[in-house]
Image (spheres, rainbow, N blue to C red):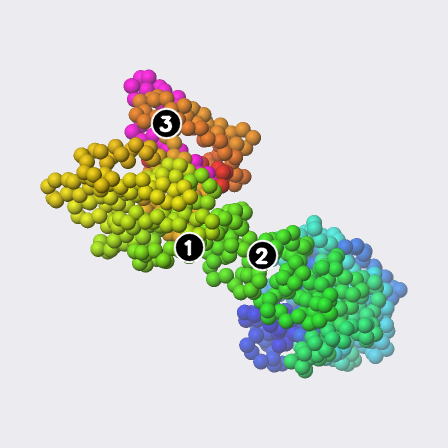
Amino acid sequence: MYCARCGKQIEDDSTFCPFCGQETDAPVTEAEGGAGGRKSLVQTLALPGLFGNKKVWGTVLALLAVAAVGFGAVKLFGGHKMKSVPEELFAMSWEEFSELSLEDMRDMLDEADIFYEEDYDNPGFETVTAEPFLEGDAIFLHDSSRPALGFAVGFRSTDDFKDFKDSLEDYLGKRVIKNAAVMSDKDSGYDEVVYPVEVSANGLEHYLDAYVENADAYDLEQKEYGVYKFVTVRYTRESLDYYAEEAAYQLDEDYVQRSCLIDVNYYLMEKNQFTILQARYGHDAISGKEMDLEKFQDSVDERLVRGYLKERVRENPDSREELEKEFYTKLYMLEKHGFDMASGTFLKTKEEERLWYVRSFNWDVEKRSLVDLSNYRNSSDIYCAVEFGYNSRDAKYFESDLDKALYLAEQNYKLGTGKGFESDTEKRLWFMQSYGYDTSSGKVIEKEVVDALIAYQNFVPKLPYIEEEPYVRYTLIYLNDDEVPECLVWSNSYNPDPTVHGAVYILSYNNGAVQMFDPDSAYQFQVSFSYTPRKGKFCADTVLGLRSAEDWVVAELDSDFHKIGTAWQDNDWEDYYYELNDSEVQEGEIEAYIDSFGFEIKIDSKEAETSILSAYDALRTTTYQILAYEFTEFSMSDGVLTFSSDGAARYGAEHPKAFSHSFPVAEDCSWGYYNAGETYPYQESDYEDMKAQIEADMDLYATDFEMFGEIGWDSPPGYYITVVDGEVVDVKVVYS
């Protein structure tokens, strides 16, 4: 918001204006404030000038943040040597000003016998006597929290005023920065002129340290920053006595009804921000010329003017001149120099220019027509991506439709429909179906695999015993030797109602259709599934009823499902009855029959997932659980981790197993230890540390076994090596 007294921009939640002290909720009055009714010179001289004027496009203070080429301070003013303290302070360069502390300034005043008041709320000073300043006398102030000085200059005659005015304007006019211009806004109601008289590339760090709270936001190495010196001049019809009396001082001299109020401000700005500032006041600081907007507007497409500008003028008729000036100034700087006033950067390509027109005016410069961005989520970036395949974030064309779709999905825009995604699951399935791409893994998937997953998703609701979605679980496995996984559907898994029966179904996808195998044996207590990967054969084992009746169905999948054998057992609370392939058998024969198939893996619904997609993620993931003493090798070379065991029954192991695996290690692989007994159970590690730990453990096992005939730990540490899509992503040691 803006201060009602001085016009400067202040924080929306401010209680008082930091520039003039005006209470934000109080009306502006001429009442004197402060102790004893004394009004501060800060209040008196903080005028509603150019830098706080609402009618200026955007507050210049917001722009004055951030250039190069220094100019030394000139000690000559109108041909005579500067002698007075206010003249010296006025002419100081940024380098000279930055080297002065508040105490240095007060010493200058003391040495010149200048009387002043100290402001302890805002450390600084206010002079109480008028000192020579060119053809006039000045009272002046400084608030050390800001790199600024304020002067009120009075005159003993109108001739002195005229001479002063000529001298000051001549002096400042000759020192305006090269290619820059004096800034004024006659329509603002304030007769102010701002002279940009100096820019320095020195002392930037000092400026940040002394005056800027968010100094980290300034990248001094990458951008061309400088400290700009601005001198704001305003002439009034009040005498210097008026300003002294307002500050509760009495001057000895009488002054005519003419005064000059001068503010000297040093602002840290980026060079292109200064270019924006100049452009907003009608000057092209790139070419060093005034803008002839009246002539330029004749070259602007009338359809753009009619469709964009006139519509906004119609909506804001009171702001017509402002809107027109802003519109043509932006276009001028873009057309003449490729300069974007919104970002303060130069556009380098025709694609950036096309995006700029869409973003600034809803205008497609290639089609020479207005754009209705409501069909593109009111986003120029989405429009450019959809209509001409341009990635505005990376400033390049998309390499593929997939890249375009991923870019748009980040903005929740579904390519082809313009709709949003209601969930990550919907987005993931859409990408799988549309592009064969998995947004979770960032990998391309075979089309037949995608078709299978979607077909399974659509087929499940048709199955019997499918009650409520929360009680359905999924497992994907490879039963046969193709690359399309089969899907186990566990219905009514974990249903708290013991009277509800469930079942397990095996789905396979072949030639564009889902095939289903139903073991036709509902379960009530538990169900398990045994198989050997890619061998085709499997067994479903279900338990039903309080008597623990149990059914087995052995089947095979090749081009279709077909049963190989069946078995069941039951009891009448005293004796068991066993049946295998429709013939009564003895106890143990069923178990021997099932074992004869040599199934390697047995799973149940406890290991199942709640969705097809999470089951697919589980299929991509393998976790190897290895006891520390089983390793015969744990090494990494060229980014590949190898871990193996020869299966020897060392250290008293009862069930040794042989294995050997090698996988590349992901760049972001995590290594760590987990100890459940610790306050902070997880500790990060790395490969070298973990290898050393394994070797130390092996030495310990060997020593214990040699001395005591057994390993000293009841529960040796377990190594969990997680592999996703063929890469090691996590290695964890767990101590129980």
Earlier in the chain: of badge 3 and badge 2, it is 2
Residue 552: name its quadrant: top left
Identity, as a three-letter code, of the amino acid under mark 2: Ala
Kind of element beneath mark 1: helix
Quarter that holds the N terminus: bottom right
- Residue for badge 1: 457
Kind of element beneath mark 3: loop
Earlier in the chain: of badge 2 and badge 1, it is 2
Residue drawn at (28%, 45%), measured in percent from left and top? 527
Q: Position of residue 38 (x, y in %)?
A: 61, 74
Mark on residue 405? 2
Q: Position of residue 269 (x, y in %)?
A: 71, 59
Residue 71: name its quadrant: bottom right
Q: Is residue 156 visible?
A: yes
Residue drawn at (56%, 65%), measured in percent from left and top? 418
How many marks can you see? 3
Q: Nearer the viewer, residue 372 or 417?
A: 417
Kind of element beneath mark 2: helix
Q: Nearer the viewer, residue 244 or 660?
A: 660
Q: Position of residue 639 (x, y in %)?
A: 54, 33
Which stretch did the figure color magenta?
Answer: 695-724
Earlier in the chain: of badge 1 and badge 3, it is 1
Along the horizontal axis of the image, is 146 left or right of 650? Answer: right
Residue drawn at (16%, 46%), measured in percent from left and top? 547
Q: CA distance from mark 2 to mark 1?
A: 23 Å
Tell which tag, 1 or 3, sits nearer the viewer. 1
- Residue for badge 3: 657
Q: Position of residue 692 (x, y in %)?
A: 45, 27
Q: Is residue 533 above or below residue 186?
A: above
Identity, as a three-letter code, of the amino acid under mark 1: Gln
Q: Is residue 126 above or below residue 449?
A: below
Q: Residues within 10 Å of mark 2 (few under 14, many from 20)?
A: many
